[in-house]
C-alpha cells in the first residue's frame, strides 16, 4: 500500500481526499479502513452486514483476491515500425508471465506531427493496461478509473482523451444512483 500525494477522487466513495493505493485502487482513509476489513476479515464484514441488515454475500469472484501491482516489474521491450516507417518501442510489464501494463514510445516524440498521435497512444496504452490488470490481477474496473486514465493521458484541452473524458463524465452516478 502506498500513499498518493495528489488530491484525487476515491475509487470507493468518490470524495476528494489524500488517497492510499491498495490492490490497484485509490481509497480515502474511510474507504481504506473498510477495504482492510473486507480484505483481511471477510467473515467479520459478513457478520457486520447481517447485524446492520445490509445485503452482503460472497460470490465466486470474491474468492479471487486481486493481486497488488508491485513497484518493480520485469518487462519485455519490442521494437516495431508504423506504416510511415517511424520506429516505436513497446514495453510490456509482466507478473508471472502475464502482461499487466503496456507502454509505447518513439524517438520522435518532440515532432509536432506526432504529438496528437502520442496523446492517443498514451490513452490507448493506459486503457489497455487497466484492462490487463483487470484480466490478470483481478483489479475492479470502474468508470472513475477509466476517467482518471483518460484525464492523465490528455496533453491539452480538447484533445481526444479530454473529449472522451468530458462525454463519459456525463455517465457518472450521482449520490442518488442516477445519471447526472
Image (spheres, grey):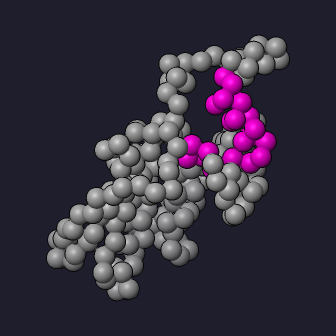
- Whether residue 171 is visible to the viewer of this picture, yes or no, is no
Q: Look at the image and give the residue range highlighted in magenta.
A: 21-42
Residue at the spot x=74%, y=48% of the render? 28
- Residue found farthest to the bottom: 111
The count of marks equals 0
70 w.r.t. 160: above or below: above
Residue at the spot x=55%, y=24% of the render? 62
Locate residue 55, reporting x and y percent.
71, 17
Viewed as shown, does residue 74 lie left or right of 85? right
Residue at the spot x=51%, y=56% of the render? 71
Asked whether 151 or 175 is in front, the reply is: 151
Residue at the spot x=70%, y=53% of the render? 19
Q: Quadrant of residue 87?
A: bottom left
Q: Is residue 62 magenta?
A: no
Asked whether 119 or 177 is in front, the reply is: 119
88 w.r.t. 128: above or below: below
Asked whether 109 or 18 is in front, the reply is: 18
Locate residue 60, reporting x and y percent.
50, 19
Amino acid at each position: 500500500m502506498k500513499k498518493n500525494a495528489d488530491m484525487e477522487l476515491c475509487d470507493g466513495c468518490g470524495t476528494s481526499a489524500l488517497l492510499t493505493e491498495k490492490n490497484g485502487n485509490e481509497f480515502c482513509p474511510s474507504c481504506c479502513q473498510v477495504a482492510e476489513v473486507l480484505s483481511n476479515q471477510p467473515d467479520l464484514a459478513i457478520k457486520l452486514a447481517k447485524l446492520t441488515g445490509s445485503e452482503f454475500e460472497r460470490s465466486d469472484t470474491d474468492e479471487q483476491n486481486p493481486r497488488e501491482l508491485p513497484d518493480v516489474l520485469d518487462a519485455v521491450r519490442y521494437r516495431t515500425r508504423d506504416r510511415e516507417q517511424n520506429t516505436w518501442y513497446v514495453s510490456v510489464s509482466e507478473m508471472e508471465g502475464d502482461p499487466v501494463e503496456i507502454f509505447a514510445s518513439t524517438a520522435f516524440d518532440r515532432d509536432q506531427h506526432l504529438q496528437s498521435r502520442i496523446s492517443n497512444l498514451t490513452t490507448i496504452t493506459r486503457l489497455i493496461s487497466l484492462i490487463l490488470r483487470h484480466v490478470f490481477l483481478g483489479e475492479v474496473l470502474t468508470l472513475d478509473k477509466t476517467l482518471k486514465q483518460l484525464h492523465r493521458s490528455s496533453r491539452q484541452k480538447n484533445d481526444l482523451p479530454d473529449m472522451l473524458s468530458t462525454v463519459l463524465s456525463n455517465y457518472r452516478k450521482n449520490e442518488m444512483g442516477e445519471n447526472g
